[in-house]
Image (cartoon, rainbow, N blue to C red):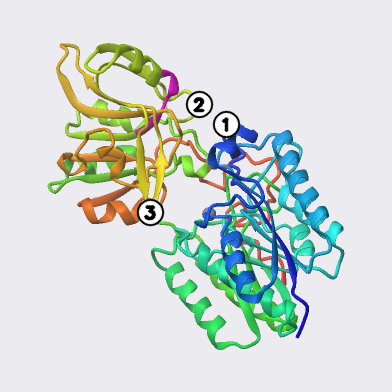
Amino acid sequence: MTNPKRIFVAALATETNTFSPIVIDRRGFEESLYAPPGQHPATPTLCTAPIPVGRRVCAEKGWELIEGTAAWADPAGLISRGAYEGLRDEILAQLRAALPVDAVVLGLHGAMVAQGYLDPEGDFTARVREIVGPDVLVCAEIDPHSHLTAKRVAALDFFVAFKEFPHTDFVDRAEDLWRIAVDTLEGRVKPVVSVFDCRMIDVFPTSRQPMRGFVDRLFGIEDSDPKVLSLSVIHGFMAGDVPEMGTKMVAVTDGEPAHGAMLARRLGLELYANRGRHLMPSTDEITAVGQAMAATSHPILIADMWDNPGGGTAGDSTVVLKELMARGARGVAVGTIWDPVAVQLCFVAGEGAEMPLRFGGKSAPMTGDPVDATVRIVALNEKAEMMFGSSVVPFGPAARVALLDGAGAETGIEVILNTVRAQNYDPSLFTAMGIDPLAQKILVIKSTNHFYAAFRPVVSDILYCSAGRPYPNDPATNPYRFVRDDIWPRRADPFADSTGDAA
Ligand SMILES: [Zn+2]
């Protein structure tokens, strides 16, 4: 019988849209999730699942789990240097105090960028490695919307990324991570990582083909190939302007690097062959509004897919709303436009008040100008919340306003203004403000894909709308400073002038 193991676990995660104007400081973590050692809730969250899963695994094995801090901030712009270094050093100090340990298990996102740090997770994992030395197992669960830098690959023994987008499998992948960690510590396997650089960047929803079939095949290979411990696709995150941004295919094998490299290359070239075919088709706001107004069955949903606060944008774009106003659309409810100042003015005026109001379009260029309208304040909600699956997402204080015409009559367009930036996940967004979403002709929301499960059953159709430029969604023309040029679509065929034998 072997000695009981001592394992250190911690989480440090967010997703940084380097083009977003909203900097995150320590309060940004504290408002989303900040759990000192031992205080992480029993419920797993997106990037902290290794903690609750680790509690169960270690309890079953009779091992000691030493918990460090867990911190997650909702996606926005750069992390302040003080916030990153403070949280990093807090966790590293906890690790030093926990020594000696047999393993370090981390929950990371992998797309963090901080002031002065283009690769914070590389910096963090390298420091962890330095503290524990070469022989202690260090592993992590990561989000596929991340940057797989060489520094991280060198510092970690292995890692596992979520396979699904939307990320419905973050607990399952934490289970994978822990299973491989236990097998390694008990000497049954020896994980080796092989990475293939796909030399591309794309968006890979698994709710549609070709990615659905691809991910199902990854599961099949994991089940049938005894040399394979885990397969991950690092989708990459095009809103992060960092040198190693891009799609990577990862195979973790049981001490079989040649086999892993062959597999990663074969699968990675398949992703490359399907480049540009993964994302759902979209239209501009003129076409989307035209189609929505011509629809005969309702409600029809316009997803303002790139002004998605879940991807770090402000969520105050007015492009779709202005098109609806210009065309005289009626029966319209617009999900959140972020404008804390306008909400404040509405609260002062009170429900029922009519007033001129300027709102939205303040935070970023190419997201439309502010809207100037006469409005009637229909409803105010200090603690507005919507659902996302079984979790509750706050977006208040919020104001529901009806836009009026020159004669003071309602135009048939209502807008929800909010204070806490939040992706629009669920129809409860509207009911929280007293709007019956099913009674509307047109609903407008801000979300790329996470809305799909809750809205699909209650709307007649979904129109994916690419309006303005709130998000850097065209890697061919995004004004990058650091991103490499040798990836598709920045280069037409990056494999053309080489053998394709990437690392
Ligand atoms: Zn993600």
- The amino acid beneath tag 1 is Ile
Circle nearer the N terminus (2, 1): 1
Q: Residues within 10 Å of mark 3 (few under 14, many from 20)?
A: few
Instruction: Name the element at disc 3.
Output: loop
x 86%, y 57%: residue: 130
Which mark is in front, 2 or 1?
1
Relative placement, left or right, of 336 versus 235 is: left
* Residue 500 in view in this figure: no
Residue 281 in the image: above or below residue 433: below
The crowd level at tag 2 (other Cα within 10 Å; few <14, some 14-19, many 20+) is many
Which region is colored magenta? Answer: 336-341
Question: Which residue is identified by label 3?
Answer: 390
Residue 422: percent from the left, percent from the top? 44, 39
For marks 3 and 2, give the CA distance. 31 Å
Tag 2 near tag 1, CB within 8 Å: yes
Tell me which numbered mark, 3 or 2, is placed earlier along the sequence. 2
In-front residue for pair 170/312: 170
Q: How many numbered badges does the structure rendering display?
A: 3
* Marking on residue 363: 2
Q: Please state which amino acid type lies under the numbered disc 3.
A: Ser
Residue 467, placed above or below residue 47: above
Amino acid type at mark 2: Ser
Q: Which of the 4 image quadrants contains residue 125?
A: bottom right
